[in-house]
Structure formats: structure tokens, C-alpha cells
Amino acid sequence: MKFLYKLILVLGILIALSCFVQFVVFNKFFISNTNSLLLSTNEKASKDVSMQLMENFNKIQNLVKTVAENEEIRENQELLNKFNEIIPEVDAVTILNSKGDILRMYGNIHSPGVSNLAYRDYFREAIHGNTYISNVFKIASGTKVVVISVPIVKDGSIDGVVVGIVKLQGTSLASMFDNKEFGRSGYISILDSHGYVVYHPNKERIGKKSIIFDKLQGKSGSKIMKDYSGEEQFVGFSKIPNLNWYVTVITPTADIMTSRNIVVYETFLGSVIVGILIILLGIYTIKRYSKPLDNLIFSFNALKAGKYKKIDSHNYGEEFQEMVIVYNSTIERLEKEYNDLEEAADIDSLTGAYNRRAFNNFLSTLNEEISNCSLGSVGVLLLDIDHFKELNDTSGHLAGDNVLKKLAEIMKSTAGDRSVFRFGGDEFAVVIRNISDERLLSIAEAIRLKCEETLNGCTVSIGAAKFPKDTYSIDKLIDFADKALYISKKSRNKVTIFVK
């Protein structure tokens, strides 16, 4: 069973290690994949927003071009004011002549404070025939704006410029992006070609230089960067064609990490719970099977020690029943074979009587019974064949063996099979429990007479003693019977009862 406990210990360690490895690998794999997924998602979102923004600016350009192409609208202040309702994305429209002088304005923006804008980049670009979208700059009032300028073409030549002004902290851009959601805290940020913030949900950031601008390279991409707050963000970016502006979609890593950690730790906790359940199941299984197996091992050890003890099948589960049946059947067979071997070991091979080993064991049993006060009486006869040596010398050992066999048959038929013992040579003993003096003497005489008649000229001398009449000691009882035999041997063919 020690092996099983070691096995469950090793299994527990392996499960713990597998949970740890699974946690590390899954965490790394999960982080890598979620990072890649979020960055890819943000990059795609930035591309979608850049296209939307470009479409919006194209719409504004087309509307401003409408003003530039329609002299009636340009010349009529009332029509210009009505036109503001048509293009609410533009906060103000300014009409400039070919020299940059402001002819008229409409919209919800303050007066620029100057009458000529010829020095502005957007005027110079438009007066040369280009439609132009400016970077972020401040007008005289301090408002941060982006300007869309369109040339006025009259009779094949440029006659002026129409300027559409979009306030960055107004509602036109915000209306496009403030309703965009990217997770719980994700947001859009738009940067001009110099890195200044054109749009940000935090209005205080608009017009300020972005700290991630220098890290944005190429038409599009995604990176993990730190923003102005110093926290890491998932940043997807895309460049707006023809403007060199960047649209960035930013998602804080903290929010994602919180959700991701919940998933990771739930997975780890699930692995730990499964591991614990497996270990508990293993312990239960070992306990269920170890006790019956321990009992079986104990029984086998007892069997090795020579104790043939059957197992009670009621103490074992169904899965052990067949094993118990086989074991008990084996015990029965071994016990029978052992008894047969024991008996064979106690039998004299020539005469079939019990041998000296069996005699000594029997005497030990009698001594125990005397100690337990459970022995009533015992009679002992010691026998010796007269003239046995002369028979062997004259007729041979085969004739002597036949005499020994005949004597054993006579004693067993007279005193009983289990009462006859051969000491060795031509010496025998008869031990009978609970016998009277008269009966002991009668058996001795019957043996002597039958031997006299059938042993081919040989006779027997017999000495007799009895417990407890002669002694309370089994050893002395044998000694007293031997002394009585010595007396019978003097005259031969005689039975002598020991007398103190």
C-alpha cells in the first residue's frame, strides 16, 4: 500500500505542476492572442474612422465648392446665412477676393480681427487652384480651428477663395465621434500632420501635441504605447489619405487586463478544483481498495506462517468477491494437503504406525491437558520383540520387516489405529486415554497372545504403567512403563504392570 500512497502523492504533484504550467502557458497564450486581437481590432476601427472622417471632409469640401461655384450665394448675405443651415458641419464661411481681402462672412464664429488673410497658407494654396485642408491653428480670437479652402474660378481665372472654418472644440467633429464606443474606456483621437490633436473626447487635449505622434509610422498599424496619462494603451492608427493626419483608436490595457485576469484566474481555479477532485478521488479509491488488500496481505502472511484462516467475504466489496472465493478455496485445499502431509510425516513408512515424532507431539499434548486439568487417565504399554535380532540374523531383514508389520497390525486391531506408535527398531508403544486398569491389562495380554501365535516364533515383552495411579508426570509414566518392560524382558513373552 505504500506504493499506492506514493503514487497518489506523485499524482498530486503532477496535477499541481500541470495546473501551474497550464496557467502559465494559457496566460501567455491568452495575453498574446488577446493583445493581437485588440490591436488588430483597434487598427481596423482606426481605418474605418479615417474613411469616415475623409468622407466627412469631402462632404464639407463639396459644400464649400458649391458656395465657390455659385456667385449668387456668395453675393447674397441672406443666402449665405441660409446655406449655414445646409452645411452645419462648417462653423463659419468667409469669402475672400483674389488679394485675400475679406468680402463677407457668415456663421457662428467671431470676426478674425483682420481684414486681409493673404498671408495664410490656406489662402495661398487655394489662390493657386488647390483645394486645401489645413492643420490645426489658432485664429485671432484664440479659437483652434481647421480650415477648408476652395478657389473661386470666374471666366477661367481664380477670382477669390471660399474658406470653410471648423472649430475643433465645437460640436461638428464631436458629433461624429463622441458617440463611438471602444470597450468601457476606449476613445478616438485625431492628430494633424504635425501631431496636434484635432479631436479628443477630453476637450482639454484638443490643440495640444500628442506624445504618441512620433511613434506612428506608415499608413496604418497597432502598438501598445503609453499615452499622456502614463498608462499603457492598445493603440490602432491609420493615416488619412491626402491629409497626412492620423486617426488613433485607443483602449486602456487596464480594463482589458481586468477582464482577462478574471478569465485566466477562473481557468486556473477550475484547474485547481479539478486537480483537488482527482486527488480526493484517488485517495478515496486507495482507501476503498487498500483496506481489503491489506487484509488479504495479512491473510497471506498468516498463511506463510502456517495459519490456514479463511476470509469472511461479507467484509469485502463485490469486486473482491471472486478473489476471496479463490483464496478460501485455496486455503481449503492447502489445509487438507497440509494435514495430509502432517499425517504422512507422523506415520512410520514400514508399519503404518505413528512414528517417534508423533509420539513426542502426543506426549506434549498430554502434558498440556494435565496442566489444564482436562486429562482423566492414560494407560501406556511399551513393547519389545523377543529374539528379533536372531530372526534378522538367521532369516534376513525381510523376515524381520514382515514381523514388524504383523505386530503393528495386531496392536492397531486390538488397541486402535491412533493409539500405536513405533519408537524405532523393534520397540513400540501403545497410549490409550480414559482406560481402566483391567482394560489396559486385557489389551496387553491380547496383544501378547496374538503375537505368540502369528509372529513366526517371535514373542513380545510388555511393560505397563498408568496415569494418575502410578504418577502425575507423563515423562515418569513412560519411565515407569520402561522399567516394567525391563522386568518382562528377563523372562520374555510376559506382561508386567508397574508396581511402586
Image: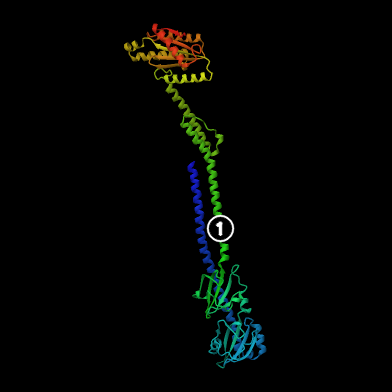
Q: Position of residue 217 (x, y in %)?
A: 49, 75
Near-viewer residue (480 or 83): 480
Can residue 453 be seen by looking at this rendering? no
Q: Which residue is mark 1?
A: 265
Residue under the image location 58 percent in, 73 percent down: 188
Task: Establish if 62 lies above or below 330.
Answer: below
- Asked if 220 appears above or below 265 in the picture, the reply is below
The quadrant in which residue 201 appears is bottom right
Say what amino acid the circle numbered 1 marks.
Tyr
Outermost residue toward the front?
500
Q: Residue 369, image x and y in percent?
A: 51, 19
State whether residue 27 is above or below residue 459. below
> x%, y% of residue 139?
60, 85
Along the line of sight, the residue nearer the viewer: 167 or 347: 167
Display coloring: rainbow
Q: Secondary structure at mark 1?
A: helix
